Image (cartoon, rainbow, N blue to C red):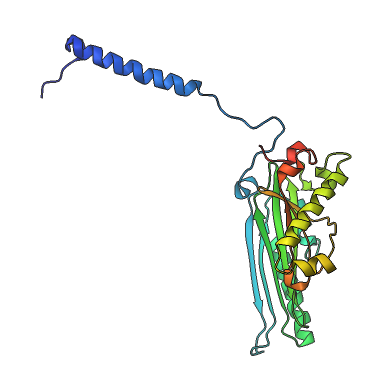
Amino acid sequence: MKRVSMSKAPAASRHVVLVCLLAVLGLTACERKKPVEEPPAGAATTVSAEIALPSTPVEVKLKGQGCGDRCAEFEADWLGFPGQPALDAALLRLIDAPAGNADVAGVIRQMGQRFMTEAAEAGEPWQQDIEAELKTGVGQVSVIQVTVYTFTGGAHGMTSITPVNWDRQLGRQLALTDIILPGRADAFWAEARKAHQAWAHSRDNSGALAAGWPFATTALFALRKDGLELQYQPYEIGPYSEGAPDIRIDYARLRDVLKPEYLPAR
């Protein structure tokens, strides 16, 4: 096949090629000039939990031996956070883990062995499950949810859920007083009461909840991407059948209540 050089190509062909090149360059220029949408100043942006706060899984499973179907069990599905000793310590305090050891896996195993020893001394099939789960928060906040189930006899075990809001920039756990604007605490709890009322009305036993389980404040919360969740333990705002309930408040109701850095972009 004879190759045709651009210099000797027919005039019409050169015209077509020139038009195409100009069109491509025009599109490229348009793409470069396309404005980039940015969130409002001061608003928080969401970053995936795993990228924002890298973690290492810690798994421990212990079971009694020679006890038939009455064996005690301990199971942990935990997380360690490399380079974040303050966060590791904060989480371990929530489960009464042995202090003074920087080895998270070692601490969890020691805790499990202590539980199994106590169960053996009691001669009972006790059970304990602990879990730390990393969830996506808002902006500079990562949420780690700690769940503990313990059965040491009686009609049933007990489950507790404790969220930890970790400010990655400040390097510490947040309290409600850290995220609410000065002078807006009353407004926050007013919105919380409305959210509680909506939650109670949505339950199958709404009549019993309204009659015997009034609203209560809590220090536990989670800055989740879809709203602020107030966390409660069993029996705090409902019977055991309600478990450990959480009540969500939409961020739209908290725009003039929370500090801007703890709100998602509109």
Q: Quadrant location of the N terminus?
A: top left
Residue 210: image quadrant is bottom right
Q: Residue at x 74, y 49 (%)?
A: 166
From where the camera sits, is residue 165 visible? yes
Q: Residue at x 71, y 47 (%)?
A: 250
Query: Which residue is more in the foreground, 189 or 9?
Result: 189
Q: Residue at x 76, y 80 (%)?
A: 117
Can you give x and y, in whole percent of width and height, for residue 40 in the image?
Answer: 67, 31
Q: Quadrant location of the C terminus?
A: top right
Can you give x and y, in whole percent of width and height, for residue 169 in the image?
Answer: 73, 40
Q: Is residue 227 above or below residue 18?
A: below
Q: Residue furthest front?
A: 207
Query: Which residue is more in the foreground, 200 or 168?
Result: 200
Can you give x and y, in whole percent of width and height, for residue 142 in the image?
Answer: 69, 48
Can you give x and y, in whole percent of width and height, for residue 122 in the image?
Answer: 79, 86
Residue 18: image quadrant is top left
Q: Is residue 152 above or below residue 136?
A: below
Q: Is residue 37 above or below residue 186?
A: above
Query: Which residue is more in the foreground, 41 or 194?
Result: 194
Q: Is residue 52 left or right of residue 215?
A: left
Q: Residue furthest left?
A: 1
Q: Is residue 51 left or right of residue 43?
A: left
From where the camera sits, is residue 238 visible? no
Q: Residue at x 76, y 45 (%)?
A: 171
